[in-house]
Image (cartoon, rainbow, N blue to C red):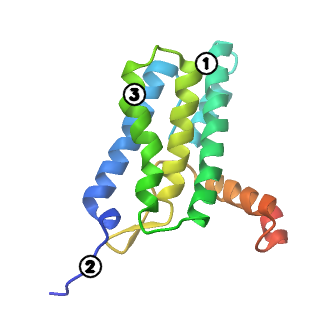
Amino acid sequence: MESRNLLPQNTRLMANLLSFSGGALDVFCHMYYHSLVATQTGNILLLVADWRNSSMYYNLLRCFSILFFSLGFLFGIWFKDHRKNAYWRVYGLLPLCVMTAILPFLPSNALIELPIIAFSAGIMMKTFTGSQIENHPFVIFMTSGNYRRMLTALYYAIQGSGDQREYRR
């Protein structure tokens, strides 16, 4: 049998833990904030479908979630492009780990908590985009590939690197 050297982030255990974390974040945020932080395409659909029936407060939370997730994802691209060592993926998980550890001790304020969780989820999403689990492609969270590609193209178009015509398209 062939021996494979797998990095810790490329194991099935890590895939299961990250998938469970993404689902748990969405369930928690939907129960408490009526918004999603990991499934941004679902968040956009909820925003459009419930625009008239939902309170403006929940619509604002969904908009914040989309905005801060996107900012976190863009920061994650920058972070990945400027990584200095092999532990960059661990550092990408730190904001989410810290936030979830201190969340129970903070006074409840969804307008502060949800954007921080969404920003951290965006960083985590980009940190593990393009990952492989046992040499098979793996994508964490349920964000549309089109949404991720749009944010990536936006980042590189603003930065001015790569094929600008393709990014603007």
**Sequence-first disc among 2 and 1:** 2
Which residue in the rendered view is the most extreme toward the front? Answer: 84
Q: Which residue is mark 1?
A: 58
Residue 99: x %, y % from top left: 44, 33
> For the residue labelled by badge 1, is the local secondary structure a helix, a strand or a loop?
helix
Amino acid type, mark 1? Tyr
Which residue position holds label 2? 5
Apparent side of residue 125 relative to residue 63 in the rendered image (left or right): left
Q: Disc 3 on helix, strand or loop?
A: helix
Query: Where on the picture, by quarter, is residue 60?
Result: top right
Of labels 3 and 2, the one closer to you? 3
Q: Quadrant of the C terminus?
A: bottom right
Under mark 2, the amino acid is Asn
Q: Are marks 1 and 3 in contact (CB under 8 Å)?
A: no
What amino acid is labelled 3 in the image?
Answer: Ile
Q: Residue at x 61, y 18 (%)?
A: 58
- Left or right: residue 167 versus residue 9 is right
Tell me where residue 132 sits by quadrant: bottom left
Return the residue nearer the eye: 28 or 101. Answer: 101
Residue 61, percent across and down?
A: 62, 24
> Could you tell me which quadrant the N terminus lies in?
bottom left
The residue under label 3 is 102
The residue sitting at 54% across, 27% down in the picture is: 114
- What distance separates the C-alpha of mark 3 from that of mark 2? 35 Å
